[in-house]
Image: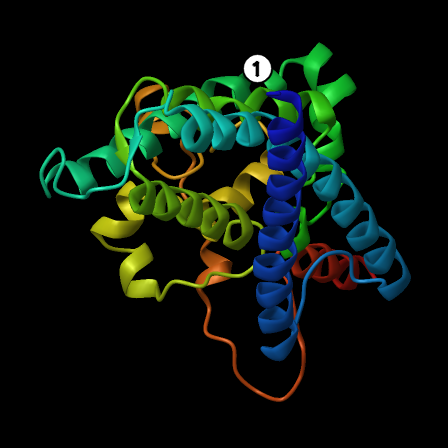
C-alpha cells in the first residue's frame, strides 16, 4: 500500500523540482540575456551545447532529488512521521526564522565539506568534473551535477525534517533560498548592488562574485550561502570585483571569465 503513494509522491516531486529548476533558471537566463550579458562560452555554438548539457544533467539531478523528497511527502501527509507541522504557533513565532537558519546553516555545512571532498583528485575526475565542465557556467548550471554528487545532496533536507521541527511554509522558504542562491551564483554577473556586496551582507553571504572565483580557481570559495566555513578554513579568496561593474551602453557585455579570456587574447594579438 505504501508503494503507490510513494511512486505518486516521487513523480509529483520530480515535476515540482524540475519545474522549479526550469522556471527559476529560465527566468534568470532570460534576465541575463535581457541585460545584454553573454553568459557561458563566447562562441554561440559551444554555448548552446553547454546549456543543453547543463539542462540535461540538471533534469537527471531533479529526478534524484525527488526520490527522498517523495518519501518525505508520503511520510508527512500519509503517516505523520516527520517533524513538519502546520500550525505556525505550535513552537512559537520566533522558531520560524530560527528553524530556517538551522536548515540553511546545516545545508551550507554539509555542502562545504562534501564540496571540498569533490575537489579531491579521485572525486573530481569521476564526479565533480561534470559541474566544472561549464566554463564559465550559466544560470542553467545550478543543478548540473553527476548523479553521485546529486545523491550526496539530495538527503540533507529530507533527513533534517525527521530531526528538526519546521513549519511547512518555513521549509518552502528554505527551498526558495536554496534555489535562488544555486541559480544566481552561477550567472556570471552580480545581481546584488555593489554597496551590499562590499558591505556586511557581502562579508557574510556568498553571491555570484564570490562563487565565480571558485569556478575560476577551483580550490577556494567552496561554500553555498555563507562565507563562515571558507573563512574558518582559510579557503576564502574574496570575490571577483569585475562582476560588480555597472553594465551600461548598447553593446552586449561578455560574462566575466570569458571577458578576461578575450582580453588576454587581444593583448597577445
Residue drawn at (55%, 51%) of the image: 183
Residue 152, quarter of the rendered image: top right
The part of the image, by quadrant, that contains residue 123 is top right
Q: Is residue 149 left or right of residue 69?
A: right
Q: On the rendered image, what quadrant is the N terminus found in?
A: top right
155 lies above or below 180: above
Give the left or right position of residue 261, taking residue 43 as reference: left
In the image, residue 184 sits, relative to residue 144, either above or below, namely below
| Residue beneath the point at 42% across and 23% down | 79
Under tag 1, what secondary structure? helix
User: Viewer-proximal residue, 28 or 6?
Assistant: 6
Residue 29's spot in the image, x, y percent? 64, 65
In front: 47, or 66? 66
Please say whether residue 36 is visible from this viewpoint. no
Residue at the farthest right position: 45
Q: Identify the residue under disc 1.
A: 117
Say above or below: 95 vs 240: above
Amino acid at each position: 500500500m505504501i508503494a503507490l503513494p510513494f511512486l505518486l509522491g516521487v513523480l509529483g516531486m520530480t515535476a515540482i523540482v524540475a519545474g522549479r529548476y526550469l522556471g527559476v533558471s529560465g527566468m534568470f537566463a532570460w534576465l541575463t540575456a535581457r541585460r545584454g550579458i553573454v553568459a557561458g562560452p563566447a562562441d554561440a555554438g559551444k554555448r548552446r551545447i553547454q546549456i543543453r548539457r547543463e539542462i540535461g544533467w540538471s533534469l537527471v539531478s531533479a529526478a534524484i532529488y525527488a526520490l527522498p523528497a517523495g518519501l518525505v511527502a508520503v511520510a508527512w501527509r500519509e503517516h505523520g512521521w516527520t517533524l513538519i507541522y502546520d500550525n505556525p504557533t505550535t513552537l512559537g513565532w520566533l522558531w520560524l526564522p530560527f528553524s530556517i537558519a538551522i536548515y540553511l546553516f546545516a545545508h551550507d555545512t554539509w555542502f562545504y565539506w562534501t564540496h571540498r571532498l569533490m575537489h579531491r583528485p579521485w572525486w573530481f575526475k569521476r564526479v565533480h568534473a561534470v559541474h566544472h565542465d561549464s566554463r564559465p557556467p550559466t544560470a542553467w548550471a545550478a543543478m548540473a551535477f553527476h548523479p553521485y554528487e546529486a545523491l550526496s545532496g539530495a538527503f540533507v533536507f529530507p533527513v533534517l525534517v525527521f530531526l528538526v521541527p519546521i513549519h511547512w511554509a518555513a521549509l518552502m522558504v528554505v527551498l526558495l533560498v536554496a534555489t535562488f542562491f544555486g541559480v544566481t551564483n552561477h550567472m556570471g554577473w552580480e545581481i546584488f548592488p555593489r554597496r551590499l556586496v562590499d558591505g556586511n551582507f557581502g562579508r557574510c553571504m556568498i553571491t555570484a562574485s564570490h562563487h565565480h572565483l571558485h569556478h575560476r580557481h577551483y580550490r577556494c570559495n567552496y561554500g553555498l550561502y555563507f562565507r563562515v566555513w571558507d573563512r574558518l578554513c582559510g579557503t576564502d579568496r574574496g570575490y571577483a570585483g569585475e562582476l560588480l561593474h555597472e553594465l551600461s551602453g548598447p553593446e552586449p557585455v561578455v560574462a566575466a571569465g570569458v571577458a578576461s579570456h578575450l582580453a588576454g587574447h587581444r593583448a597577445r594579438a
